[in-house]
Image: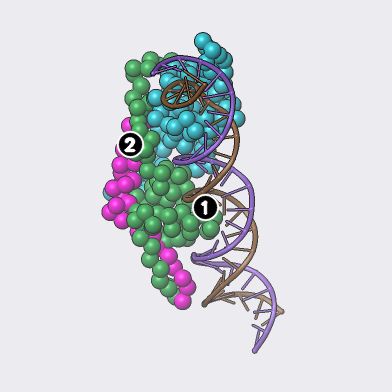
Chain colours: A green, B cyan, C brown, D purple
Amino acid sequence: MKKLKDNKAINISIEKIDKVIHEPARMKIMANLYFVESMDAIFLLRQTNLTWGNLATHTKKLEAAGYIEVKKEFIKRKPHTMFILTKEGRDAFESYTKRMKHVFEGF
Amino acid sequence: MKKLKDNKAINISIEKIDKVIHEPARMKIMANLYFVESMDAIFLLRQTNLTWGNLATHTKKLEAAGYIEVKKEFIKRKPHTMFILTKEGRDAFESYTKRMKHVFEGF
DNA sequence: AAAAGTACTTTTTAACGAAAAGTATATAGT
DNA sequence: ACTATATACTTTTCGTTAAAAAGTACTTTT
């Protein structure tokens, strides 16, 4: 067992953990968009294994937070939804992962 | 920006993330107990900056999951609560941190 | 003896996530 | 032509949860 003084993680303040990204489903969405920048709903659905209902609500939350932009259009007379990572989203995701990396360094 | 194929985190299955530990308040409790093995309520309260109400409910949840043991006794006529990390708790925390480290490696 | 403090637990409230149900349009079969 | 199935979603429902507030029991202080 490690000694208490070695531990950095204990003093991480939970207030600073972005709960919008912390939820695994949304983390997955954000991680995908972080790498690809924009994706349509079908691709994201396959990547995340979420249900349509969950994808809709989680992306709505990310949109409300200003982390993604949702663009709806018709392609060949069919609805088509595009998710685009915003600058704020990119920044938020980066500070989240940075923080998490730091938290788990101690273990 | 990194390329999609480099990304390992995207394919982490969210189902395997232990939600009991994932909640920041409980993660903090678990992290503390992981290093010190057992603590009383007052010490844990100070370490975590939680309210008494939150500490009580979160520890109850950890107890229900079998991750900690809660021992109540009287010391000098006053109630005294001790939290002890169980073997399951230690194992669960270790696999959680291992998983998280792996997830955030890609970023 | 009353007030204030300690160490909590329980209740309430509001938000959340997951699943189910619903919607609108398109295409395919009969 | 028309019914059925499929696609691409959104909205609603429901159970769970976290956070805050309120409550409890006892003790110490004034």
Above-or-below relation of B3 to B69: below
The answer to whether one can see residue A67 in this image is: yes
Report if residue B2 lies within the magenta region: no
Report x, y in % for residue B6.
36, 44
Q: Which residue is mark 1?
A: A50
Above-or-below relation of B93 to D12: above
Looking at the rendered structure, the secondary structure element under dot 1 is loop
Dominant secondary structure of the residues highlighted in magenta in the image: helix
Image quadrant in which the C terminus of chain B is located? top left
Question: At x 28% / y 54%, what residue is drawn?
Answer: A87
Of residues B55 and B13, the one nearer the viewer is: B55
Question: At x 51% / y 10%, what residue is drawn?
Answer: B76
Above-or-below relation of A46 to B9: below
Nearer to us: label 2 or label 1: 2
Magenta residues (range): A77-104
Residue A67 occupies quadrant: bottom left
Three-letter amino acid code at the position of disc 2: Arg
**Along the horizontal axis of the image, is A94 left or right of B77?**
left
Of residues B22 and A82, the one nearer the viewer is: B22
Q: Which residue is mark 2?
A: A99
Report x, y in % for residue B5.
37, 47
Three-letter amino acid code at the position of disc 1: Leu
Residue at mark 2: chain: A
Residue at mark 1: chain: A
